[in-house]
Image (cartoon, rainbow, N blue to C red):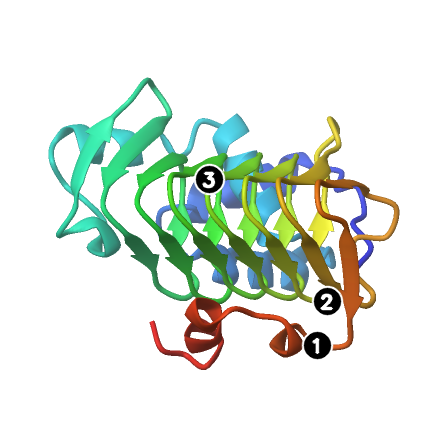
Amino acid sequence: MIITEVKWSSAIDELLRQKFKELTIEKLREEIFTKHGINVPELLILHRAEELGLIDEVFKELERGKKPSYLKSQRVWLQGAETIRVKGDVRIPPKEVVPYNLIVCGDLFTKEEVVIRGGIHVKGDAVIGPRNGIGKSLVVEGDLLIGEDTLIGNCVDARGSIYMARGVTIGISKEGGGLVSGKTVYMERETLGKTKIYAAEGIRIVDSLKEVLPEKFRVTMLGGY
């Protein structure tokens, strides 16, 4: 996957200011493409909205006790200005936009096309669905599965094994990034390109992750969560 630099114009910025609260990130992407002919990844739209000060209201809602649907049953703490800490497992539905850093004291499961503005720290295992966007780093204390065509801003670090599908791109931010596993990295072909990888127990290239996935992740790939 090729990530091109986006040159934000005053016209696109004005569109974001007018439509950010009204439209989903997916619809914003479509409107930018229709009006300006630029295909901007949703993750970059979210970053630009942050730079323009358009997502502060989300934090104000959390402070007032208003939580998104996927956190309704969890205990949530605001930890600093841009981070939330969640007790228990978190399951994020498709096409959800998460405009803050996440600390998950449990397992994390995301469906397809989820966009997370900040970084993620997961105390358990993590399953990142296909075509997700993560703005900063992803740190997992257990095992990690990353779905196809997912974009990650900075680094990926897991104490356990890492399983990566085709098309995953790490280090799209200007700071770049790399990948570290305390065990084995399993990668489908056509993944990562020139990304720096360290795996304590080595790297294994496979035709399909289904060949090597542990049972706990097989259920996930079949839609069991």
Between 212 and 209, the one lying in front of the other is: 212
**Image position of 91 (left or right of 118):** left
Whether residue 81 is situated above or below residue 202 in the rendered picture: above
Between 147 and 23, the one lying in front of the other is: 147
Label 2 packing within 10 angstroms: few (<14), some (14-19), many (20+): many
Determine the secondary structure under disc 2.
loop
Q: Residue at x 82, y 55 (%)?
A: 2
Asked whether disc 3 touches disc 2, contact meaning CB atoms under 8 Å apart, the reply is: no
Q: Which residue is mark 3?
A: 141
Q: Residue at x 50, y 57 (%)?
A: 128
Give the residue type that dot 1 points to: Ser
Residue 53 shows up from this direction: yes
**Image position of 174 (left or right of 34):** right
> Please, which residue is most extreme toward the right here?
194
Label 3 packing within 10 angstroms: few (<14), some (14-19), many (20+): some
Q: Position of residue 108 (x, y in %)?
A: 38, 52
The answer for how far apart the CA atoms under marks 2 and 1 are is 9 Å
Determine the secondary structure under disc 3.
loop
Residue 57 shows up from this direction: no
Determine the secondary structure under disc 1.
loop
Q: Which residue is mark 1?
A: 208
Mark earlier in primary sequence (2, 1)? 2
Give the residue type that dot 2 points to: Arg
Q: Position of residue 151 (x, y in %)?
A: 65, 51
Q: Position of residue 25 (x, y in %)?
A: 48, 55
Quadrant of the snapshot with the N terminus: bottom right
Q: Which dot marks residue 166?
A: 2
